[in-house]
């Protein structure tokens, strides 16, 4: 599990990690509240640098106010800012949501597209957000969601040496079957929130400590 680990050994170790996390978190899922692809898209945009718990509080009122892409496109910037203010960076998020939904209305008949390229062409929608929507709303494994938890854990576990989400995603996609890409994100996110926290990871009780080169060193 050091720098001398071969690619084959890393792949084999990764397989055991995924199998262990799957047993540990059999109910792992996206923890954003939503009932359709549009709600998940909006919630994911709001989740940038904000907790899912806070987003879920905010979207209760937001989803009552706006039910269609046209609703978001036509709501005033000021009203939307007030509704999403507590998620942080609210002005930019409100601007992106309105622009994104205006695009949905004009280019996609108000529906959330099922294609990665079409999603990432929308305002405020990067690859991570697109992967969240495709994997969870549509059950499509087009990539791996790399948020702060996935980035932290993949490096701690020695599964990548990369620093950028895009390059980390490419490394992880090579280590797990495509049909598990969406679940992989959930497994790592759940473990990051419940065991491998940023400041005080619970290495003593970690289910994958024996497979982790960072165990007991943080």
Image (spheres, rainbow, N blue to C red):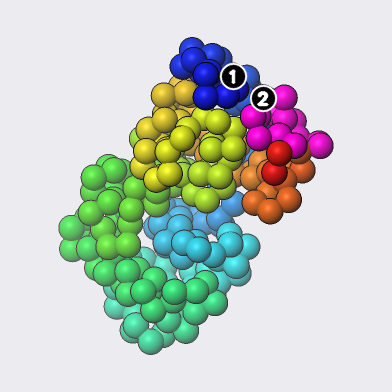
Measured as percent of width and height from the top left, residue 190 is found at: 64, 43
Residue that extends furthest to the bottom in the rendered view of this protein: 78
Position of residue 60 relative to residue 40, above or below, is: below
- Image position of 118 (left or right of 88): left
**How many other residues sit within 10 Å of disc 1, few (<14), some (14-19) or many (≥20)?**
some
Measured as percent of width and height from the top left, residue 85 is found at: 49, 79
At x 59%, y 51%, the residue is 31
Q: Is residue 211 magenta?
A: yes
Measured as percent of width and height from the top left, residue 45 is found at: 42, 61
Q: CA distance from mark 2 to mark 1?
A: 7 Å
- Image position of 174 (left or right of 215): left
Q: Tell me which corner region of the image, top left, top right, bottom left or bottom right, holds residue 105.
A: bottom left
Q: Are marks 2 and 1 in contact (CB under 8 Å)?
A: yes
Residue 203 visible at all: yes
At x 54%, y 65%, the residue is 50
Q: Which mark is residue 211?
A: 2
Label 1, on which residue? 13
The numbered mark, 2 or 1, whose residue comes first in the sequence reads: 1
Q: Is residue 37 magenta?
A: no
Q: Which residues are magenta?
A: 204-216
Q: Nearer the viewer, residue 84 or 2?
A: 2
**How many other residues sit within 10 Å of disc 2, few (<14), some (14-19) or many (≥20)?**
some
Measured as percent of width and height from the top left, residue 217 is found at: 71, 39
């Amino acid at each position: 599990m050091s720098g001398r680990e071969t690619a084959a050994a890393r792949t084999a170790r990764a397989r055991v990690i995924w199998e262990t996390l799957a047993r540990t978190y059999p109910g792992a899922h996206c923890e954003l509240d939503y009932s359709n692809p549009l709600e998940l898209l909006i919630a994911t945009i709001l989740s940038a640098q904000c907790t899912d718990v806070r987003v879920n509080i905010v979207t209760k009122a937001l989803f009552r106010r706006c039910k269609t892409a046209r609703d978001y496109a036509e709501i005033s910037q000021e009203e939307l800012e007030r509704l999403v203010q507590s998620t942080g960076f609210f002005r930019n998020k409100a601007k992106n949501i309105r622009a994104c939904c205006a695009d949905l209305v004009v280019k996609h008949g108000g529906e959330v597209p099922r294609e990665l390229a079409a999603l990432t062409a929308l305002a405020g929608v990067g690859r991570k957000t697109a992967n969240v929507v495709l994997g969870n709303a549509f059950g499509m494994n087009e990539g791996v969601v790399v948020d702060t938890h996935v980035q932290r854990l993949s490096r701690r576990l020695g599964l990548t040496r990369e620093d950028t989400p895009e390059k980390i995603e490419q490394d992880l996609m090579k280590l797990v079957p495509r049909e598990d890409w969406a679940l992989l994100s959930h497994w790592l996110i759940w473990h990051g929130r419940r065991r491998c926290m940023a400041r005080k990871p619970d290495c003593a009780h970690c289910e994958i400590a024996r497979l982790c080169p960072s165990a007991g060193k943080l």
